[in-house]
Image (cartoon, rainbow, N blue to C red):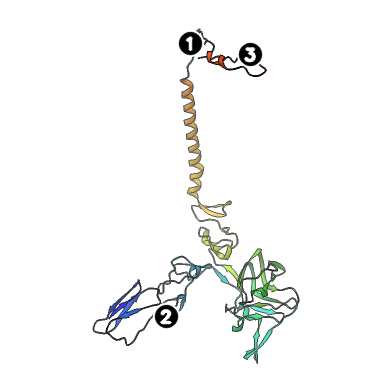
Amino acid sequence: MRVTYPGGMECNLKPNTMKTMCTGDATADKLYIDGKAGVNHIKLIGCPPELYGKNCTNECHCSRGESCHQISGICKNGCEDGWYGKKCDKQTYVNIAQGKQTNQTSIYRKLGENICYNGKCSKFDIMTSDKAVDGNFDHAVPHKSCAQTKSETDPYWQMTLDKPYMISQLRIYNQMNESQSLEGFKVYLESTLCFEGRKGKYMKEVINIKCQKPVNSSNVKISLEGKKRRLTLCEVEVLQCVPGFYGDMCKEHCAFCVDSKCDQVTGYCEEGCVIEYYWDNNSKKCKEKCKYILVYILVPLTLFAVLNVGISAAISCWEKRPVAKLGERIRKILVNRVSESIPEAPYSRAKNIVYIVVL
């Protein structure tokens, strides 16, 4: 019997058995077996593209949704936004909204299975405000994991954090297939407007929000304006960068700040840069001091060397110039006869005469 297997795998017949064992790591959807021997049992062991590990319990976080190595979890082309590390298993930010206290102007109830909430049971699906911070990112409303108000005037949803945070970034999971329902929504931090969705512009299913400026707040409010509006939020995240990261979606790394402490918005080193680095106000980053020294020492030295060569060349030319001896008369060159053939210019009677004087 012969087994045709994809590249990256090796198949061998186990000693004293009729079993062929294939090991390795490959992505394939076909396995060819030919020969006279019969096949009694085939067992394929592997993880789905988005998982890895011994029991396929770890989730891949590779860039562009690529699959990772099924055993090691390593991503070939880097990590997706918000993740870092060799296995892309460490987050650059944390969500401080999950499980926090919430409320909304009304609760939409939809006829469905028996649902129990706060000790009361009914045959309605209850779209309560807490479902927007339950950690379930499924944005299909029929799956019952979204907060939703009734169709009403100026509906809103709000959340209270355990303490004030300097907030600049949020992420909203909009409902699937009806993303236009959030058209023109607003996000407030306390009473300060953080973000306003453009009217007449459909929203994405996942909306990354960056406030106009950071606000120290413990209250987040999301609202719609107008009549017969229904507010639906499948998940709301309030993002805080972990130490060592800053910027949009916490992608930037402030590795050269002391203890990796930096402002999560600007990246400014709160306790200065590490040894051999200095804070550059132009690039807003820590830079190596040796580069600083090279720029401010080598450049002037180079300019001085060029200037010195130029001055030396000028002096040499000056010293070699022809000079008439004292009392020597300079010989006068006769009129250039060629110039006499040049016709007179209009309105001029004088002839063009050129004198050449040799020093």
Q: Count residues near mark 3 (Cα–Cα under 10 Å), then give few for <14, some for 14-19, many for 20+.
A: few
Upstream in sequence: badge 1 or badge 3: 1
In screen coordinates, is 55 left or right of 150? left
Q: Amino acid at mark 2?
A: Asn
Is 317 situated left or right of 211 in this image?
left
Question: Which label sits on residue 325?
Answer: 1
Q: Quadrant of residue 57?
A: bottom left
Percent coordinates x, y for residue 284 in the rendering? 57, 54
| Secondary structure category for the residue under label 1 | loop
Could you tell which of marks 2 and 1 lies nearer the N-terminus? 2
Residue 96 position, x and y percent, is 60, 73
**Residue at point 49%, 28% (across, down):** 311
Q: Which residue extends farthest left?
A: 16
Report how far apart the C-alphas of labels 1 and 3 lie in the structure: 36 Å
Residue 350 is tagged as 3
Q: Residue at x 34, y 78 (%)?
A: 32
- The Cα atoms of the two marked residues, 2 and 3, are separated by 108 Å
* Residue for badge 2: 55
Q: Quadrant of residue 183?
A: bottom right
